[in-house]
């Protein structure tokens, strides 16, 4: 069962090949199974995913066919003790993000104090002037947050990215667990793992707690706004609506009626209290943002500002996804919590700063460079795996618009085993825990979505770039 990689922290095995405590129960079970069991179960799981329709689209591909996200049958396992520390760090960061957003759209004390440069907001498309002076119902901006974590050692977890706009992937977390429990029910009687299947119920409860003033004490009506069936995450939108018992709506199903946003039903139009939108800010309201949008509903921002609806996540939260803002998160956490960050950032060079740009250009072949507004693994350079031609092309981009980029060291991400034809082999992973925020508190689902780079040596875990997913286990005490 040797899977160690000399340069990376192996989450399952110590350097001498002995099994770490997190994996002790799993490895005992694994060693007792027939050699081809996991491979057979893997084929069954793939067939299940195809029947269920768990697919995604890759934008920009000429064929644009729907694909399965590859699922690996070996779980990623985290001890209860490690999870407690992670949870404290995640909660601290999410509290800071919400406080930061409130400040940005009100007094901007962090800018006045000199801790955050005003240039990061000026001409930043993610900062919405329409939100200035407005406080969302319950004071919650980021109702659902995904915090991307990487691990480089036993106790060394770092935040790679914050996803405060419309974090995706929770449906894969849920389906991965359901599949594992269906394939290996006896394994879950031997290894006690914390539950994730109640996430949709917790999501519904958290969203309902953020109802707007217009709800007036009645049971809140929650709906999920999707761009439609051609969106890459449509499966997730439909899945979550179904699991929450909420309506799945498109912009064409909605209109303003009596100062409320109402959805078309078989009994006429019914007011919505909370809209979990999976549509970007730009397309949310053609009267306020992109006039050509058919994905949102005209007038929703006026209804929102008048207290007639809650939009989750709040418009303007995308500023927290900005990678230049990310580089200031240690200062942001300390400014709003009065505490040192429990979870550290990955060291980051801001290419807008001349000294940082010079360092990045001099060391481009060793660094990872990302667009400040990029996502999904697009628009980035991984220096050590790039050709001279690719490096030269990216250098030209950097020199032309340095403010569009940040750079980070090439981290030696931790590895966990995946099942290959030759047996278990280590592959690099990250982790996206999902966090729910309401006036009642912060609720962190134990585990999250583990994304895995299926190619040997690859550090890119995004599904759009060939990555896969795993079930993430947090052990019970």
Image (cartoon, helix red, strand yellow):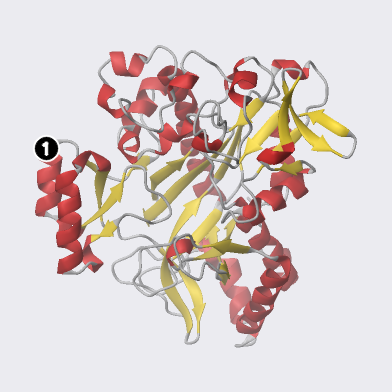
Q: Is residue 117 visible?
A: no
Q: Is residue 396 among what the camera can see?
A: yes
Name the residue tied to disc 1: 354
In percent of the image, x 68 and y 23: which residue is there? Answer: 309
In this rendered view, identify the residue nearer to me: 407 or 79: 407
Residue at the farthest front position? 292
Find residue 44 and report its horizontal and vertical position in percent: 69, 78
The spot of residue 400 in percent (x, y) is 16, 45
Q: In the image, is 96 to the left or to the right of 265?
A: left
The secondary element bearing badge 1 is classed as helix
Taking 63 as reference, is 434 above or below it? above
Q: Residue at x 14, y 43 (%)?
A: 357
Tell me if 418 is positioned left or right of 224 in this view. Answer: left
Label 1 Cα crowd, 10 Å radius (few <14 / some 14-19 / many 20+): few
Name which quarter of the figure residue 323 lies in. Answer: top left
Give me the residue at 37% from left, 56% from top. 378
For the residue pair 209 and 310, the one nearer the viewer reads as 310
- Residue 249 placement (x, y as % from top left): 72, 42
Q: Is residue 238 left or right of residue 381?
A: right
Is residue 92 left or right of 404 when viewed as pictured?
right
Give x and y (percent) for residue 460: 38, 62
Between 74 and 316, the residue placed more toward the observer is 316
């Amino acid at each position: 069962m040797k899977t160690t990689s000399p340069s990376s922290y192996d989450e399952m095995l110590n350097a001498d090949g002995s099994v770490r405590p997190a994996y002790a129960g799993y490895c005992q079970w694994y060693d007792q199974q027939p050699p081809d069991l996991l491979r057979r179960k893997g084929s069954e799981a793939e067939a299940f995913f195809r029947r269920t329709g768990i697919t995604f689209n890759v934008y920009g591909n000429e064929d644009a066919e729907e694909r399965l996200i590859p699922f690996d049958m070996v779980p990623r396992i985290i001890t209860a003790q490690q999870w407690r520390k992670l949870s404290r760090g995640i909660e601290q960061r999410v509290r800071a993000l919400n406080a930061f957003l409130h400040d940005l759209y009100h007094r901007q004390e962090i800018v006045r104090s000199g801790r955050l440069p005003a240039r990061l907001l000026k001409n930043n498309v993610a900062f919405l002037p329409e939100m200035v002076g407005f406080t969302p119902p319950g004071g919650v901006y980021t109702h659902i947050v995904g915090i991307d974590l990487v691990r480089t050692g036993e106790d060394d977890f770092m935040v790679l990215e914050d996803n405060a706009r419309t974090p995706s992937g929770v449906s894969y977390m849920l389906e991965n667990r359901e599949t594992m429990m269906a394939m290996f029910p006896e394994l879950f009687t031997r290894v006690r793992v914390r539950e994730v299947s109640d996430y949709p119920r917790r999501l519904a409860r958290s969203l309902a707690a953020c109802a707007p003033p217009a709800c007036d004490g009645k049971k809140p009506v929650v709906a999920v706004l999707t761009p439609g069936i051609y969106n890459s995450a449509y499966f997730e939108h439909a899945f979550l609506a179904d699991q929450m018992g909420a309506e799945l709506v498109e912009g064409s199903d909605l209109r303003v009626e009596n100062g409320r946003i109402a959805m078309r039903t078989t009994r006429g139009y019914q007011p919505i209290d909370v809209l979990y939108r999976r549509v970007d800010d730009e397309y949310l309201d053609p009267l306020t943002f992109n006039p050509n949008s058919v994905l949102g509903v005209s007038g929703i921002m006026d209804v929102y500002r008048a207290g007639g609806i809650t939009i989750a996540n709040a418009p303007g939260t995308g500023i927290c996804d900005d990678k230049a803002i990310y580089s200031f998160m240690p200062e942001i956490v300390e400014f709003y919590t009065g505490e040192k960050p429990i979870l550290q950032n990955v060291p980051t060079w801001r290419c807008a700063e001349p000294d940082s740009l010079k360092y990045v250009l001099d060391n481009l072949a060793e660094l990872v460079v990302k667009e400040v507004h990029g996502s999904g693994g697009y628009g980035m350079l991984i220096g050590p795996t790039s050709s001279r031609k690719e490096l030269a092309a990216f250098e030209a981009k950097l020199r032309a618009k340095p403010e569009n980029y940040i750079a980070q060291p090439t981290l030696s991400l931790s590895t966990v085993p995946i099942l290959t034809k030759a047996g278990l082999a280590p592959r690099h992973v990250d982790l996206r825990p999902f966090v729910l925020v309401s006036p009642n508190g912060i609720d962190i689902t134990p585990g999250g979505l583990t994304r895995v780079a299926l190619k040997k040596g690859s550090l890119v875990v995004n599904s759009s770039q060939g990555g896969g997913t795993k079930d993430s286990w947090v052990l019970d005490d």
